[in-house]
Amino acid sequence: MDVQYLNTDLEIESKSDLSRIVKEFGNDVLVHHHGEIKSYQHASFSIAGGCADADATINSFCLLVEQLPKDVRQIWDGCCSRLFDIGYESGTSPRTLRSEIRAATIQRIAELGASIVVTIYPETKESASGIATHQGGLSNKPMDASPNASDVSRNHWSGDT
Protein backbone atom coordinates (compact mmCIF):
# COMPACT_ATOMS: atom_id res chain seq x y z
CA MET A 1 0.00 0.00 0.00
CA ASP A 2 1.23 3.49 -0.80
CA VAL A 3 1.95 6.15 1.80
CA GLN A 4 -0.48 8.94 0.98
CA TYR A 5 -2.01 12.20 2.09
CA LEU A 6 -5.62 11.63 3.10
CA ASN A 7 -7.12 14.93 4.22
CA THR A 8 -6.82 17.82 6.64
CA ASP A 9 -9.59 18.40 9.14
CA LEU A 10 -10.20 21.56 11.12
CA GLU A 11 -11.19 20.81 14.70
CA ILE A 12 -12.31 23.56 17.06
CA GLU A 13 -13.37 23.52 20.72
CA SER A 14 -14.99 26.19 22.85
CA LYS A 15 -17.10 26.80 25.93
CA SER A 16 -19.31 28.92 23.61
CA ASP A 17 -21.76 27.79 20.94
CA LEU A 18 -20.05 27.17 17.57
CA SER A 19 -23.24 27.18 15.47
CA ARG A 20 -22.50 30.57 13.91
CA ILE A 21 -19.12 29.36 12.62
CA VAL A 22 -20.73 26.21 11.22
CA LYS A 23 -23.37 28.34 9.51
CA GLU A 24 -20.86 30.83 8.05
CA PHE A 25 -18.66 28.05 6.62
CA GLY A 26 -21.80 26.80 4.87
CA ASN A 27 -21.45 24.55 1.84
CA ASP A 28 -17.69 25.15 1.63
CA VAL A 29 -17.16 22.48 4.28
CA LEU A 30 -18.37 19.05 5.31
CA VAL A 31 -19.29 18.99 9.00
CA HIS A 32 -18.04 15.77 10.59
CA HIS A 33 -19.19 16.66 14.10
CA HIS A 34 -20.92 19.57 15.79
CA GLY A 35 -22.01 19.22 19.37
CA GLU A 36 -21.07 18.97 23.01
CA ILE A 37 -18.38 16.68 24.38
CA LYS A 38 -17.49 16.80 28.08
CA SER A 39 -18.96 20.29 28.64
CA TYR A 40 -17.20 21.76 25.58
CA GLN A 41 -18.63 22.61 22.18
CA HIS A 42 -16.77 20.80 19.38
CA ALA A 43 -16.87 21.09 15.62
CA SER A 44 -14.87 19.16 13.03
CA PHE A 45 -14.77 20.06 9.34
CA SER A 46 -13.15 19.12 6.05
CA ILE A 47 -13.17 21.14 2.85
CA ALA A 48 -16.03 20.12 0.54
CA GLY A 49 -14.57 18.50 -2.56
CA GLY A 50 -11.16 18.12 -0.91
CA CYS A 51 -7.83 19.59 -1.95
CA ALA A 52 -4.70 18.08 -3.46
CA ASP A 53 -2.47 18.54 -0.41
CA ALA A 54 -2.35 19.76 3.18
CA ASP A 55 -1.02 23.22 2.28
CA ALA A 56 -3.89 23.91 -0.13
CA THR A 57 -6.48 22.58 2.34
CA ILE A 58 -5.16 24.68 5.21
CA ASN A 59 -5.15 27.78 3.01
CA SER A 60 -8.78 27.10 2.07
CA PHE A 61 -9.69 26.92 5.76
CA CYS A 62 -7.68 30.06 6.53
CA LEU A 63 -9.59 31.98 3.87
CA LEU A 64 -12.91 30.86 5.38
CA VAL A 65 -11.85 32.01 8.85
CA GLU A 66 -10.38 35.29 7.60
CA GLN A 67 -13.70 36.08 5.86
CA LEU A 68 -15.84 35.49 8.96
CA PRO A 69 -17.91 38.52 10.02
CA LYS A 70 -16.39 40.33 13.00
CA ASP A 71 -18.90 38.98 15.55
CA VAL A 72 -18.39 35.39 14.33
CA ARG A 73 -14.62 35.88 14.24
CA GLN A 74 -14.84 36.72 17.96
CA ILE A 75 -16.33 33.26 18.52
CA TRP A 76 -13.35 31.77 16.62
CA ASP A 77 -10.92 33.86 18.67
CA GLY A 78 -12.61 32.64 21.86
CA CYS A 79 -12.05 28.97 21.03
CA CYS A 80 -9.77 27.15 23.46
CA SER A 81 -8.51 24.86 20.69
CA ARG A 82 -8.12 25.37 16.92
CA LEU A 83 -6.33 22.47 15.20
CA PHE A 84 -5.52 21.65 11.62
CA ASP A 85 -5.23 17.85 11.73
CA ILE A 86 -3.26 16.61 8.72
CA GLY A 87 -3.91 12.93 8.02
CA TYR A 88 -1.66 10.48 6.19
CA GLU A 89 -2.01 6.76 5.62
CA SER A 90 1.18 4.80 6.16
CA GLY A 91 2.33 2.12 3.76
CA THR A 92 5.35 0.43 2.29
CA SER A 93 5.99 2.63 -0.74
CA PRO A 94 7.29 5.01 -1.75
CA ARG A 95 10.20 4.85 0.64
CA THR A 96 9.63 8.50 1.62
CA LEU A 97 6.86 11.05 1.25
CA ARG A 98 7.46 14.80 1.44
CA SER A 99 4.59 17.13 2.18
CA GLU A 100 5.39 20.83 2.38
CA ILE A 101 3.56 23.39 4.48
CA ARG A 102 4.84 26.71 3.13
CA ALA A 103 6.11 29.48 5.42
CA ALA A 104 3.28 31.79 4.33
CA THR A 105 0.75 29.12 5.34
CA ILE A 106 2.40 28.65 8.73
CA GLN A 107 2.22 32.41 9.24
CA ARG A 108 -1.52 32.41 8.42
CA ILE A 109 -2.07 29.54 10.88
CA ALA A 110 -0.24 31.45 13.61
CA GLU A 111 -2.23 34.63 12.90
CA LEU A 112 -5.43 32.62 13.38
CA GLY A 113 -4.18 31.26 16.71
CA ALA A 114 -4.32 27.70 15.40
CA SER A 115 -2.00 24.71 15.66
CA ILE A 116 -1.03 21.82 13.42
CA VAL A 117 -1.40 18.15 14.33
CA VAL A 118 -0.20 15.31 12.12
CA THR A 119 -2.04 12.00 12.33
CA ILE A 120 -0.55 8.94 10.65
CA TYR A 121 -2.99 6.09 10.21
CA PRO A 122 -1.51 2.58 10.12
CA GLU A 123 -1.65 0.50 7.01
CA THR A 124 -4.71 -1.75 7.22
CA LYS A 125 -6.00 -4.79 5.44
CA GLU A 126 -9.46 -6.23 5.41
CA SER A 127 -9.71 -9.48 7.32
CA ALA A 128 -12.03 -12.29 6.23
CA SER A 129 -14.65 -10.86 8.58
CA GLY A 130 -14.48 -7.49 6.83
CA ILE A 131 -12.90 -5.77 9.83
CA ALA A 132 -9.81 -3.67 9.17
CA THR A 133 -6.82 -5.13 11.01
CA HIS A 134 -3.36 -3.81 11.80
CA GLN A 135 -0.70 -4.96 9.33
CA GLY A 136 3.07 -4.99 9.15
CA GLY A 137 3.93 -5.08 12.84
CA LEU A 138 3.98 -1.31 13.20
CA SER A 139 3.79 -0.08 16.76
CA ASN A 140 0.93 2.20 17.82
CA LYS A 141 3.10 3.91 20.40
CA PRO A 142 4.17 7.47 19.60
CA MET A 143 7.78 7.81 18.53
CA ASP A 144 9.99 10.45 20.10
CA ALA A 145 12.24 12.64 17.97
CA SER A 146 15.17 10.24 18.28
CA PRO A 147 13.97 6.62 18.26
CA ASN A 148 16.43 3.98 19.34
CA ALA A 149 17.73 1.44 16.83
CA SER A 150 15.34 -1.32 17.90
CA ASP A 151 12.34 0.99 17.44
CA VAL A 152 13.51 2.00 13.97
CA SER A 153 13.89 -1.61 12.89
CA ARG A 154 10.69 -2.86 14.50
CA ASN A 155 8.62 0.03 13.06
CA HIS A 156 10.10 -0.11 9.57
CA TRP A 157 11.13 3.55 9.79
CA SER A 158 14.40 2.67 8.10
CA GLY A 159 12.57 1.02 5.21
CA ASP A 160 14.00 -2.39 6.10
CA THR A 161 11.55 -5.19 6.71
Image: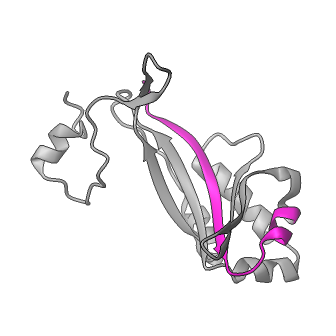
Q: Is residue 36 above or below residue 126?
A: below
Point out the image quarter for the C terminus: top left
| Residue 17 seen by the camera | yes
How far across and down, in percent of the image, does residue 52 sit?
64, 39
How far across and down, in percent of the image, does residue 82 sit?
62, 70
Residue that protrudes farthest toward the left in the picture: 149
How far across and down, in percent of the image, does residue 125 sit?
43, 24
Residue under the image location 53 percent in, 40 percent down: 5
Q: Is residue 47 above or below residue 89?
A: below
Q: Is residue 119 above or below residue 6?
A: below
Point out the image quarter for the N terminus: top left
Q: How is the image coloured?
A: one colour
Query: In the image, is 47 to the left or to the right of 94?
Result: right
Viewer-proximal residue among 98 and 12: 12
The magenta segment: 1-23
Residue under the image location 43 percent in, 46 percent down: 120
Please tell me how many numbered marks the rendered image carries: 0
- Reply yes or no: does residue 8 show up in magenta: yes
Query: In the image, is 95 to the left or to the right of 109?
Result: left
| Residue 67 seen by the camera | no
Residue that protrudes farthest toward the top in the picture: 128
- Reply yes or no: does residue 99 show up in magenta: no
How far across and down, in percent of the image, does residue 91 sit?
39, 31
Query: In the image, is 140 to the left or to the right of 44?
Result: left
Residue under the image location 52 percent in, 47 percent down: 87
